[in-house]
Image (cartoon, rainbow, N blue to C red):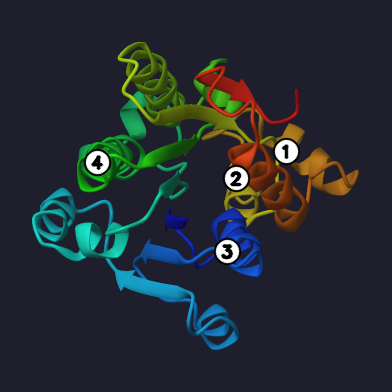
Amino acid sequence: MKAILTGHTRGLGAALAHELLSRGIPVLGLARGDAATLQSSFPALLTQVKLDLSDGAALSAWLSGDALRDYLAGCATSLLLNNAGTVQPMGALAGQDPDAIARAIALNVAAPLMLTAAVVRASPGAQQRIVHVSSGAGRSAYPGWSVYCATKAALDQHASAAALDATPGLRICSLAPGVIDTPMQAEIRATSASQFPLRERFVELKRSGALRTPAACAAQLIDYLLGADFGKRPVHDLRN
């Protein structure tokens, strides 16, 4: 069993990487930076590739090589965790930069879809378990989050349609993990109310201690990913 994980250097991604590595599962981490502490703790299990996943051309070039196929060669079970994402740009349409929209779609949608297809192609005959880290924002609209909501809804629809293909060996789920105390949450709280009218709701979640720790969420998510029920529902919420 081997895992590919995007955005493994911070937040939930770092917690997911630590959880997988602690269970003895090798991880190929894809991110703009690297995770030095994780690398020193798990030198034999962690492979890192510096890659800007919002750059579609760079991702396409990497996927056109042999690195992914070589990493998964002989692996009986391939895990893909599409975790990397951005909540930007926030705000009403008139304040959104078109280039920021393009980068968000590339990171939140194009990269997960590209990697999903690539992993399936690179590991024929293997069992594949693929999780898109989605959000409740993909299922409920929020003011100021039109891009974020749309991109997370795209992941939900992708998993639903891919499940209908009934590819042998493939289990896929677009999974909302709940509200977690991550740098993205801090970014949301730092946003002005004019950009995100529901900002105070998220401030209160932090103030009241309602945010889950990344470690606790990661442990539950990996348990679910490896469990017998994974993939029975292509769109799911980890809190249910």
Q: Are marks 3 and 2 in contact (CB under 8 Å)?
A: no
Q: Quadrant of residue 112?
A: top left
Give the class, few, some or many, for how many residues have Cα within 10 Å of label 4's Cα (few <14, many ≥20): some
Above or below 36: residue 105: above
Q: CA distance from mark 1 to mark 3?
A: 22 Å
Q: Earlier in the sequence, mark 3 or mark 2?
A: 3
Asked whether 150 or 14 is in front, the reply is: 14
Residue bearing the label numbered 3: 14
**Residue plotted at (57% across, 33% down):** 196
Q: Which mark is residue 188?
A: 2
Above or below 61: residue 116: above
Labels 3, 2: front one:
3
Please identify the quadrant where the C terminus is shown: top right
Residue bearing the label numbered 4: 124
Q: Judging from the image, what secondary structure is the residue with disc 1 in?
A: helix
Labels 4, 1: front one:
4
Q: Earlier in the sequence, mark 4 or mark 3?
A: 3
**Residue plotted at (44% across, 31% down):** 148
Q: CA distance from mark 2 to mark 4?
A: 40 Å
Residue extending furthest bottom? 40
Q: Judging from the image, what secondary structure is the residue with disc 4 in?
A: loop
**Residue plotted at (70% across, 46% down):** 180
Q: Which residue type does callout 3 highlight?
A: Ala
Asked whether 122 or 110 is in front, the reply is: 122
Q: Earlier in the sequence, mark 1 or mark 2?
A: 2
Q: Which residue type does callout 4 highlight?
A: Pro
Give the class, few, some or many, for how many residues have Cα within 10 Å of label 3's Cα (few <14, many ≥20): many
Residue bearing the label numbered 1: 202
Image spot of residue 115 (x, y percent): 28, 44
Give the class, few, some or many, for how many residues have Cα within 10 Å of label 1's Cα (few <14, many ≥20): some
Image spot of residue 224 (x, y percent): 66, 37
**Residue plotted at (42% across, 43% down):** 88
